[in-house]
Amino acid sequence: MMDGEERACEGPDSMYVKLISSDDHEFIVKREHALVSGTIKAMLSGPGQIAENETNEIKFREIPSQVLSKVCEYFTYKAQHTNSSTEVPDFPVSPEISLELIIAANFLDC
Amino acid sequence: MASSADVVKKIVRLKLQLSDTAEPGTVLKILQKLSKLDITIDILAETGIGKTVNSFRRHEEAGEIAKSLVYGWKRLVPSESVSPVVDKGLTEGVPMRDNQWDRSFSDDERLAQDDVNNNSLKVRSKNQDSSEDETECKTPQRKPDKEDKEEKKRKRKENNNKTSEVLQENLGIAQKDVVTKKTENLEDKRDSSVVTKRKKNCQKEEKQGEQECLFGSSEDTRQRSKSDSREKRKGPSESGQFRSERDSKTSQSHSGIHQKKNKESKDPSSCEISDQRLRKGMKQSEAHNEKRRKSDDKPLSLSSKESDDKNQSNHRKAKRKHGSNSDLEKPAMSFESYLNYDETVLKMKERSGSKKSSKKIKTLVKKQKSKDSTVNAIKSPTSSPKKFQESVMHLMDIPLPAALPECDDLSTMDYFKTKAEKVWSDVCDVSEDSAVFTGQRLNKKMQVYSGAKSTSLPSMMTLYHQCIRTLQNNINLLFETGGVPFEILEPVLERCTPEQLLRIEEFNPIYIGVTDHLWGKHCQRDFKGFKLNEYESWKEMYIRLYEERERKFKRLTKSIVSAHSSKPKGRQVKMAFIHTVAKPPRDVRIKQEIHGTASAPQPHPPRSSGKFQDSQLRATSQQVEPNKSSSSSAGNTQDPRKKTRVAPMMAKSLKAFKKQLQRR
């Protein structure tokens, strides 16, 4: 499984990227989903050769796992409903995590 | 035994040719050659020719010959009991011999009842004659179910008591047994009893290493390896084949994710088939594990079929990617196939309510894990795949991130919630919705509150805006912000009332300096006309004005209260008509005057009574006269009232009469 992950995440055109929270939870999401976030997009495809380009892993030292998981949910939500003609339900955010989530959302620009 | 060795060599050669060739003519020839050769059980087991030939059963031209060959060889193998065989790839009801143990065959019988695959049908070895017909297979299977169970139990007992030598004897019996996929499922069920048996049987297995492929019984190998994997590895005997099978089995059993099991024993084709079957079997066994409770044969078979169909699609994907035989697994492919799983899951999102792709992967992995855990209950990792699998299992053992106590249980969050289940719908203040959209009919005349509406967004809001919206709806819950910069929270604070703003500032002193413009707005709204003093911030001004107002209010309250305090409170009783006669109501008075029922003489009346008398006289000429005297006395009493009751018109006419009288 580990090999598979690395293989899936390796290379510049791999399909998945790995987002690591501050408490070392790893979230593997599709690359195109993660590119919803402007910050991640810049990290992964920036002009400089930063480490993330190689390993397709990004470590977020300030974002805890419950927040990062919600962010990943948002990626999927957005990917599904963008350009959708049907009624778009709103994305539920519980008040408890909304403060942390807003910090993360501001940081990730999404 | 030279001849047998030669025969073996020949057979091996023919077998290779068979597997290589594609032309039906050559196949025919080879099969004919094979039929001429003297083949014993040992040879069959050694070369695995039976399997190969069986694979040609369905061949266009050579099929019949292959079938007959197989039948003939099967007759060689002493048949005793019945075990249905599941032959996935080769279908038809050809009974598959297996070297399974007694236990297995009884399990097989059960499995036969389950009828996992649409294609595969088992025929009990008892009914080997009628094995071709699927329907035939089915019916006999159902019949001896009970018998099988009993037999199974018996066999189990027997096995437990037997020594290895005895087990060897049972080998002959076991050879009859046909193992089906369902065997695996049943084996899962009876792990504990199975384990012991398997240990004993592993020795058998060694010897039967070749015989496993007797008739293309890939399931057999699969099953065996599965049982092997389940063993506690205490069996000392390990042939080369045995080990590899075991390894393959172990890894296979570990997870359906990455199982390319190699049957090191046989042809690539058979191995492929076996692998396919393995995976399918695994899936089915897992499916069966879940469905075990449904004891009824038919429903189980049906449901297992359904699950199989589902699994087959997944497996086919994996199969396609499956390369040649290799001892190591190719996790990438299987992993990716599982990663692609989310695409189908995406479509079912609304129904299932799953969340993000990564989470899906995790849930998928977890699901696999749960499935596998049942299979892996007693598994012990083998040498080479051990490391790999452990890491996999370790990955799968990672729990989902532990949520902080104040956080929701994320697994229950479902952002495809139906309209009925908004998380904070009861908290949501509809009127406070952002300007982007409102859920309330504010423009219409009649505003009827019909519950919090779940409205759709006109455009996709970013996560930031979604958070802002949530916060705006729940300002009262906001106390400490934990260092969120003011600029980020500004839209939320703009909607605060002064009290809320004050509270938030109290809990978060960092906002104190920067919220002044908000206070300015409050001042302008609440205290219009007041101007800002020098060296005073809006906030200070607001507080000053607010306190002034409060003081004024209190003062007024006090005065009013004091003014009211002197007044007697409650009901008060006052005396009326103390010095005068109680005045009757107006209509009662009128009636009293008419009828002369006044209680006390009035001081007023004489003039008016006189007037009335005159009017009476004038009104009635003669009638009045005789009444004159009487009326004069009576009129005195009545007169006052009557006099007062003269209507205005009457008064005029009375005057006129008087004038006329005076003129006369």
Image (tube, helix red, strand yellow):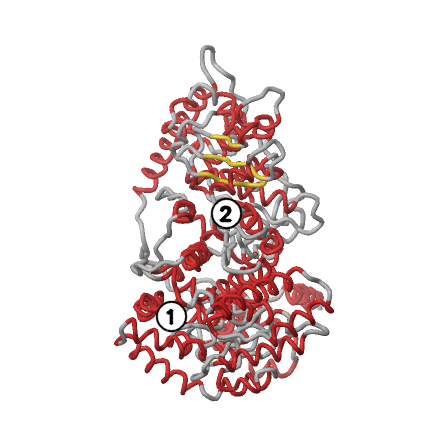
Q: What secondary structure is found at the residue carrying circle 1?
A: helix
Chain containing mark 1: B
Q: What secondary structure is found at the residue carrying circle 2?
A: helix
Q: Which residue is pictured at 63% across the width and 43% down the height?
A: A79
Query: Dot 2: few (<14), some (14–19), or many (≥20) neighbours within 10 Å?
Result: many
Q: Is residue B316 placed above or below A69 in the rendered structure?
A: below
Q: Which residue is pictured at 69% across the width and 51% down the height?
A: A86
Residue type at numbered disc 1? Lys
Image quadrant occupied by the C terminus of chain B: bottom right
Judge left or right: residue B136 versus residue B392. right
Q: Residue furthest top?
A: B535
Instruction: Say which quarter of the image contains residue A82.
Output: top right
Residue type at numbered disc 2? Lys
Query: Dot 1: few (<14), some (14–19), or many (≥20) neighbours within 10 Å?
Result: some
Chain containing mark 2: B
Q: Which mark is residue B359?
A: 2
Q: Which of marks 1 and 2 is nearer the N terminus?
A: 1
Q: Is residue B204 placed above or below B549 in the rendered structure?
A: below
* Coordinates of residue B179 in the picture (x, y in percent): 47, 73
Give the residue at mark 1: B189
Report the number of discs.
2
